Image: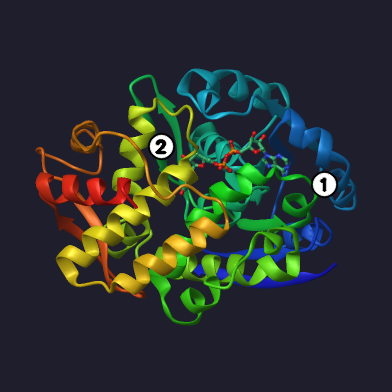
Amino acid sequence: MRIIRENSVNLENHNYKVVLSESFSGINEYLKDIQNISSFQIITEKNIYDLYNAELSSQLSSLTIPFHFIIIKGKESNKHISKVGNVYNQLIKNSADRKSVILALGGGVVGDFSGFIASTFLRGIRFVQIPTTLLACVDSSVGGKVAVNADLGKNMIGSFHQPELVFAPLNTLINSLPLKEWKCGISEVIKHSLLDGGEFFEKIQTISKKDLKSVDNISFYITESVKYKSKIVGMDPKENGIRAVLNLGHTTGHAIESFLNYKKISHGEAVGIGIITALLLSQHKLGLSEKVINNTIKIMKRLSIPYKTNLNPTILIDHMKHDKKNSKGKIYFVLLSSPGEPKFGIETGESEISDAIHIQNKL
Ligand SMILES: NC(=O)c1ccc[n+]([C@@H]2O[C@H](COP(=O)([O-])OP(=O)(O)OC[C@H]3O[C@@H](n4cnc5c(N)ncnc54)[C@H](O)[C@@H]3O)[C@@H](O)[C@H]2O)c1
């Protein structure tokens, strides 16, 4: 077993570990710390099951606690309220009870969906996140936001339900995660580096594509991301204030996703483009230096992540107005005065946004 880093999320009445590990080896030791478990109910997708069920099963076998796999369909379109009934029925068939623990094995789709099931089945049972994408490792598995989509809106039905443990086996990323999915996650890492500033933002300027294929090279960025997110979640678990900074890049990002109907572009790619809009607005409104914008674009170019869109600003602004984070036609952004100095809830005028996106489209 090689544990690369152990972090913790410390909340008023619940603490949990966030473990970055080279592989599944050792997860059994961490699961032992969860008391009084009647069964493990592992929710995962078919391709993740095929790749990793043997490794996980061999760890669980040493615990003499029964475990069952429940296979769901992957993809955002299946993270939908209409899909939960079938999983509740399978849990009942498996005799899951209040002492059962759900293990969410997969990316953010599996994590959000399984967490939602855990938060509602028998009025809430415990769960563990086992993230297998970069995005899930650095973002969705930490913080307890769980949700499914409604016909008319993404993540509209959900709750805050914190896991008992997050255990990230990084071999799953190195061995099988497609490059496209690495790119989705790296935008969230860039986001965290801008929010945190300091050494994290300095170091990420040296990142290259080859770093994405080495646990040793990538673990610094994952570690720093998790550390930053854990700290912010600990300060504001239910997003009543400072946690909103984690939405850097999301105002434009969500508008792009919504306009494209969650097809053609991934969440991570949309957030990457949104980060640049936010940085241009930060320059205009808070005096962020142009060097930070240029350096961030250089990182994105080097990793071949999109940093601009050819979409019409007016259309995007219309989608921003309908985002659940905005209200009464007002649009709010997370901006930065410098790396490490984010400000949230900055009301931003339509003409300012339009100008920024026009500039961005010409970059
Ligand atoms: N709860 C939160 O705080 C939060 C934060 C950010 C994003 N999210 C949610 O996360 C979701 C996106 O997550 P995602 O980017 O991980 O997407 P995803 O879960 O759809 O995974 C992306 C693809 O990678 C595949 N995959 C996963 N792990 C793999 C592995 N190790 N090897 C090979 N293939 C693998 C999946 O089958 C899928 O096709 C969205 O629904 C978004 O809303 C939630």
The residue at 82%/38% (across/down) is 51
The quadrant of the rendered image in which ligand 1 is seen is top right
Q: In the figure, 293 relative to 274: above or below?
A: below
The residue at 22%/66% (across/down) is 283
Q: Position of residue 163 (x, y in %)?
A: 56, 52
Q: In the figure, 19 relative to 180: above or below?
A: below
User: Which residue extends farthest bottom?
Assistant: 199
Task: Report which residue position mark 2 lands on.
Answer: 158
Q: Position of residue 211 (x, y in %)?
A: 69, 64
SS of the residue under disc 1: helix
The quarter holding residue 33 reads bottom right
CA distance for labels 1 and 2: 28 Å
Horizontally, is 343 left or right of 128 in the view?
left
The quarter holding residue 242 reads bottom left
- The amino acid marked with disc number 1 is Leu
The residue at 35%/66% (across/down) is 293
- Which of the two residues, 89 or 313, is positioned nearer the viewer here? 313
Q: Is residue 60 visible?
A: yes
**Category of crowding for the residue at label 1, using alpha-carbon neighbours closer than 10 angstroms: few (below 14), some (14–19), many (at least 20):** some
- The amino acid marked with disc number 2 is Gly
